[in-house]
Amino acid sequence: MSYQLCMICVIINKKVLIMKKIAIIFFSLLLFFSFIKAENLIAKKKVFYINSYHSGLYWSDGIEKSIKETLLKSKIPIEFKRVEMNSKRNNNEPYKMKIAQKIKNQIENFKPDVIITSDDNAIKYVIEPYFKNSSIPIVFCGINGTIKKYKELPFNITGMEEVQLIPQLIDALKKYAKGNRIGSLDDDSFSAKAQSDFFEEQLKRKIYKKHARTIDEWKKYYVYLQNNTDILLLGNSGALINWDKNKENLEDFVKEETKIPTAAWDITVSKFVVLTFANNPEEQGRWAANAVLRILKGEDIKNIPIAINEKANIYINTTLSKKLNIVFPFELIDNAVLVK
């Protein structure tokens, strides 16, 4: 009798152990799926990024990389979606309006908590027409000059304007110039035209502006401005077809044809000009991403004022400087990168 009782006890104990194991597994799975569910609930912070241009462009790549790095370092789980307008290489109006409509539909489907835009066309073709009455917070960066040039902006917008250090460039070069006529040369994109108009406002004087549609036209304008102005401001002209493929040949052309002091604000053309004060795309991207994080943490966008860039990298072209007999002050050279 006692043996049978012992056997029953053993069986009961085994069943209890099995039930305990099942209970442990059950509660472990319950906790696991609860954790996954909680993570999914937290992860509903959505950020939609519109790149006005395209991957492979130095400026755009720098902005996007710094946006992603800054957001990734935060403790806020973020679902990040990005699109490219590709509007520097496709500069015609029908294309820009069509891609803007497509992006508008993507935004409505994605339902972001915040929208980030870089450069002008995203504001002009997507935000102004479709989101001027939206409640979605919008953070811009890379806007040439001032955001105030857009008249129908949403109320909940902030960002960093991109201001080139043109007055400082002119001050650094004017003593090497034979006169005070200033010219500018760039492609015929919307951003390039807005930029050159803003330069006139900055300097409070007329600029002799040329906007090329082809590389041959660019070369013709370059020669013309060398002979008819005293300082030339050179944009990156990235909208021109086959610009990158022809850059090496154009460098030789520039070295041959340059007669006056030349300046730029984009590192990609530092080999084309005497002096470059290059804006920093990472500064724009980091600022935009940090503003987004503040908004996602609950801060009112109205408490985040619009900012302007403050940083620049200096490049001196030693080949062109030598050709023009320009010797810069030591303090400028000491803070510059020398290129040939």
Image: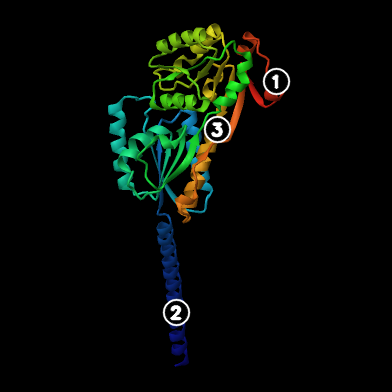
Task: Please report whichever mark, 2 or 3, sits nearer to the chain's N-terminal start.
Answer: 2
The answer to whether residue 58 is above or below residue 117 is: above
For mark 1, what is the residue? Answer: 329
> Quick one: label 2, few (<14), some, or many (20+) residues within 10 Å?
few
* Nearer-the-camera pick, 1 or 297: 297
Which image quadrant is residue 20 in? Answer: bottom left
Mark closer to the observer (2, 3): 3
Mark closer to the observer (1, 2): 1
Residue 23 image position (x, y, % from top left): 43, 73
Residue 337 image position (x, y, % from top left): 64, 24
For mark 3, what is the residue? Answer: 280
Task: Please report whichever mark, 3 or 1, sits nearer to the chain's N-terminal start.
Answer: 3
Tag 3: amino acid = Asn
- Mark 3 residue element: loop
Residue 42 image position (x, y, % from top left): 43, 58
For mark 2, what is the residue? Answer: 16
